[in-house]
Image (tube, rainbow, N blue to C red):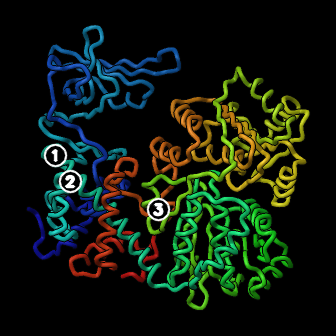
Amino acid sequence: MNTAPNHSPDEQLLTPIQYLKGVGPQRAELLERLGLRRAIDLLFFFPRDYQDMSELRAIPQLEENVPISVCGVVDEIDERNTGTGRSMLGVLIRQETQFLRALWFNQPHMRQKFSVGQRVLLSGKPRLNSLRWEMTHPRVEVLAAGEDPPSGRILPTYSLTEGLTQPALRRIVGESVERFAEFVEEVLPESFLAEKNLPTIATALRQIHSPSDNEQLNRARHRFIYQELLFMQLALGLRRHRLQHDQRSPILSATAKIDARIRRLFPFELTADQQLAIAEISHDMQCEHPMNRLLQGDVGSGKTVVAEYAMLLAVAHKHQAALMAPTELLARQHVRTLARDLRASRVRISLLTGSLSASQRRAVLEQIAAGEIDLIIGTHALLQASVQFQRLGLVIIDEQHRFGVNQRAALRQAGIDPHYLVMTATPIPRTISMTLFGDLDVSTLKQTPPGRQAVHTYLGEEGQREKWWEFFRKKLREGRQGYVIAPLIDDSNDLEVLSVESAYENLSNGELEAFRIGVLHGRQTTDEKEAVMQAFNDGELQVLVATSVVEVGIDVPNATLMTIEGGQRFGLAQLHQLRGRVSRGSHPGYVCVYASAKSEDALHRLQAFVRTNDGFQLAESDFQMRGPGDLFSLKQHGLPPFRIADLTRDGDILEEARADAQHLLGATPNLDTEAWQPVKQRVLLRYGNAMDLGDVG
């Protein structure tokens, strides 16, 4: 083994990559493109896939649809267009006197991989076609001159960059693992490894890069996936512990008298889910440590009422409450809703946004500082240094804002932290909830308040458009109102996507010319948007042609109709939020979604949307279809990406890791025992900055 005896294990692992066997300066530049700079980077550069060479066969031994690998020589290359806009590449592989044809459709880039006379290794499922064996879209590896096919082994497949071949990278990684794996510190206690039946770090590194068999590969992969998810859950637990125990908040108890006074303001029956959420929030707010709770609810489940209860509980104790919305449109909607619901109370409400004039802003700031305003509704303007609350007891963050230490510091006064309630109208898949919101307690609203009517959803067919518009007009004549949603504000080069501009022109001079139509989109000024929304709210406008700007917070109970154009451009969660605009009142809602281009993915999404009104079911479907990257970006929340874990695949392991993290932190709340110090250091190294854990160490 070529190691320098005077170098410590850490120094060995930090060996610059260019000095490793088979690398050198030129290859080091290529490897750096993959983020590989030191020996340890190679050890944790996990394969993206594997090829099982234990099933390397001769062509006469092939069986239909049984995955195998075949080694042969490129005998002939045939590239052609099929006449339907599709390309086809055929490569004939010869093995002595036997032949197999490999086919790729619509992958013209594959042509550059092949030249006649090459030795290649193909992996895939063969099938017989007119007495000739074929493989469609097999995996390919070009073998070097004189290189034997690696039979009997499971080969790792790594991500590559131009100029770097798979065999070369395999050799570099393999030699590095053999040389350096023993120097990687085992941070998990020996007793814990035995309890969880996990291989040691050195064994797992060797088996994940050069598996002995599938069983050993699976054990190694499980170790790294589990460890990655465990560390994240420990980080969330440490953050939660710090927020709960290192900060002080006002004690805001819901006494029987206060509870009765608040409930008198709600002239309707609360659902069982609302009752439970209110009980959970009341319990948190009577503690001396800050509440950190996520309130998630399906469309129309009555989150605002629960939020109102929490705010009124703060006001009952002579404290102020602030509600921060992501947009001014939503902030103004909250003000209207609260003013309506609390008109019989003496609660003082005010709006603070960036569009206020200097004199208006100055007056509001003075009232907030003097304690003359009880409920302050605003946007990020609430976090500016000029905003001084007299006695802030509760902060509600609407629509998934993440609050770090800096934002909290802006709201802390005299060492006292307010309680925090995060609200979202988008149901969150369970695995996402356990990661991005794992440091929060969760209250969930699924039931809809009594009297809410069902929403009927249809996938529109172009040939049936006139029937839909006739129904739309009939309902407008009965006194209802409706939305027409388009994905773009202006016309674009995509002729298949209708814009708000075109929809307004077409409808005003066509299907809806007899009705009063308005336009709403994100490029309008605040005053323009407010005027349009007020006119729609008052019934002066019968139809609102809009972008998805209306998807959250718009509450017009009489609007029960919606036409969605370009449905393929919207995600499932967004479609469900849009549908939520027509389920606000006592009349049934009707939604028809049209898609100008129905790809297979879009069709599955739209069929799921039509099939159910259950937002939680749709959230899980969306998660499975699109993955976590499209739904909730870890990077957007400041969290490092996973190296090997996949939330769509590893939900069971996440559940296990979360339960284990909670058990560990229950026994040693700050991971302060000697056995767990190495784990704590790794957790802080990876997540300390992202989760504001600087003072946990």
Q: Position of residue 102 (x, y in %)?
A: 31, 22
Q: Residue flagged by tag 2: what amino acid is it?
A: Ala
> Is residue 685 left or right of 623 when viewed as pictured?
left
Circle on res. 215:
1
Front disc: 2 or 3: 3
- Residue on which the image places disc 2: 220
The reply to whether residue 180 is visible in this rendering is no
Q: Quadrant of residue 230?
A: bottom left
Circle on res. 436:
3
Which residue: 85% across, 60% down?
Answer: 527
> Is residue 537 left or right of 15 when viewed as pictured?
right
Q: Position of residue 242 (x, y in %)?
A: 43, 80
Q: Position of residue 585 (x, y in %)?
A: 74, 48
Counting the numbered discs, the total is: 3
Q: Residue furthest bottom?
A: 414
The reply to whether residue 303 is visible in this rendering is yes
